Amino acid sequence: MEIFASNPLKTRDDVKKAVLDMCEPLRPLYSKGKSRLHIGNTSAGYSDSTAEVEAFSRPLWGLAPLFTDGSGEDWAEQYRRGLACGADPESSEYWGDVYDHDQLLVEMAAMGLGLILAPDKLWDPLSQKEKDDLYRWLNFVNTKKAWDCNWRLFAVMVNLGFRKVGLPYNTDVVNAAMDAVESYYLGDGWYADGINAHSDYYVPFAIYFYGLIYAKEMEADDPERSRLFKERADKFAHDFIMYFSEDGSAIPYGRSMTYRFAQAAFWSAYAYAGVGGFEDGVVKGIILRHLRSWFKRPIWNNDGTLTIGFGYPNLIMTEGYNAPGSPYWSMKTFLILALGESSHFWQCEELPLPKPDKSRALPHPHMIAQADGEHRVLFAAGHPYVNCHTHCGAKYEKFAYSNLFGFSVSKSNWGVGAGGFDSTLALSERDNVFRVKRENKGWEVTDKYIHTKWAPWNDVEIDTYIIPSLPWHVRVHIINSGRELEGFEGGFAYPCEHTSAVRHTDNGVFADFDGYTGGIVDLSGGRGAWIQGMEANTNLIYSRTSLPALGGKIEKGRTVLACAVLCGRSGGENIPSATVTDSKISVNIMGEDVIIDI
């Protein structure tokens, strides 16, 4: 929408305007008592009543920082009324008592931030009864069980709010939560989102986001833990910066991508807590360019409300907890408004992104991150466990994830067009029903390659080696199969309507689009190559895509498949080579020899 796309997002006033512009379309959608917000008619795994509380709460991620300089008094008055009404057990709009693992525990965190940042707006003006009601309701967070993941930190946020307004601070609950988070630590700045869990965006936009707020608020009372969070955040930042491009985009990976520009929320918490490893101007540039890139995308409904989806409105890619108000979690990135106009962050010049490493091994999340111009790619080994969320295989187990071309999810396991099989190897029993990698049985990450073991059937074992050197990467699959199979392997999906040319070679296919060339080349022989049309709305970034693909039969016994995948502005003429023996893989890629003992 023009109101968002035309915002230059350069100054603090521009960012304040962005918050208010996002909130204004919500104004007529609040309930009479202002404690609930009905944005749309799709549902989540929790009740529609809870979804309305979620939608009420999440704009506070942006409004609470905005309130810190006295702005938005009309919104502050509305939220005071909503908090009082929703927490009143005698009100017809009462939010309800809270139970173990209740989604309402999630939504308390934004209210906690409101008490931390703007007690003069959201707490002090309440009557004593309203304060008592709100405390009683929020205090459920100290008595109910949360899932053993980033959810443990919701109690921390609420208790920090209690502390700010002089209410009892539950030290035991906070310490138990922080100890649990400590058990998720992997090393070198990396956490997982729980024990035996993924290292996805919940590390930056949840664990670090809340942890750095804790570090800021508790610097005097808990200096050791605060120091540790900041030190780890800076280590993490030097890896996480590989996810971001100079154009402002970031790599979609994992679940909860409907939270969109929360991808940069870590950097806002980094600035707010004064971590200081990167210059303020660098951090400012990352955040503002990221917001600009998102505000120009078609992510808004016609009334200006934020849609469910990623690069465009899309329910196919969502999780079961994505309700109409869920995307407003994105407003976490507006935490930078809690830094006043006179702060160095807002006074300094926006700086460009530091020159990235061409390649960086990330052993803790099982990845290699690479940069090529504005292209950023995560090459992933995957994980030895799954979670219960939708499209887990697509979100965590593909071979590559791109900031420019995203990844795709399936509409169906029948046929390759609906399968969303970019950056993956899909296998069928020659019946057109395909399986993909959903978890690994072992992995290795080195500076030069990734090795992952997986088994789509009990009698089919695959060792996949990924050797990246953008704009190319080579994949080698050593398949030991107890059954006859059909294989389909996809490169990067690209916007098919932007195609300017398609070229076929003896063993590969290439497509030109938007100044890029994408392609795939069979290096082992025996597979056909073609451009595969994809079902609409399977890709996260583009609603209509195609992808370069290879396919062919796989017999029982040992089969070696090797291919080279291209996506870049240049380098298409330097096709890699690969040779595989019983003991060794030899690859020449971008002029470098990589030898892997197997």
Image: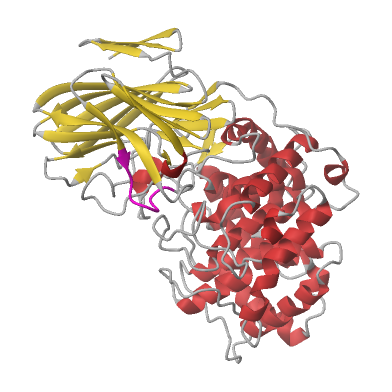
Residue 173 visible somewhere in the drawing:
no
Extreme residue in the right direction? 342
Quadrant assignment for the C terminus: top left
Q: Main secondary structure of the magenta part?
A: loop
Residue closest to the eye, 168 or 426: 426
Decide whether residue 534 is among the magenta residues: yes
- How many numbered callouts? 0
Picture coordinates of residue 8 (x, y %)? Answer: 76, 50
**Whether residue 396 is situated above or below residue 74 in the rendered picture:** above
Please give the range of residues in magenta.
532-539
Residue 570 visible somewhere in the drawing:
yes
Picture coordinates of residue 90 (x, y %)? Answer: 60, 92
Picture coordinates of residue 50 (x, y %)? Answer: 50, 75
Residue closest to the eye, 171 or 61: 61
Decide whether residue 402 is among the magenta residues: no
Picture coordinates of residue 360 (x, y %)? Answer: 54, 23
**Whether residue 308 is situated above or below residue 401 in the rendered picture:** below
Which residue corresponds to the image point at 69% horizontal and 39% vertical from the top-left? 286
Quadrant assignment for the N terminus: bottom right
Which residue corresponds to the image point at 77% horizontal and 74% vertical from the top-left? 76
> Which quadrant of the figure has residue 504?
top left
**Whether residue 144 is situated above or below residue 521 in the rendered picture:** below
> Which quadrant of the figure has residue 500?
top left
Which residue corresponds to the image point at 36% horizontal and 35% vertical from the top-left? 423
Which residue corresponds to the image point at 49% horizontal and 57% vertical from the top-left? 309
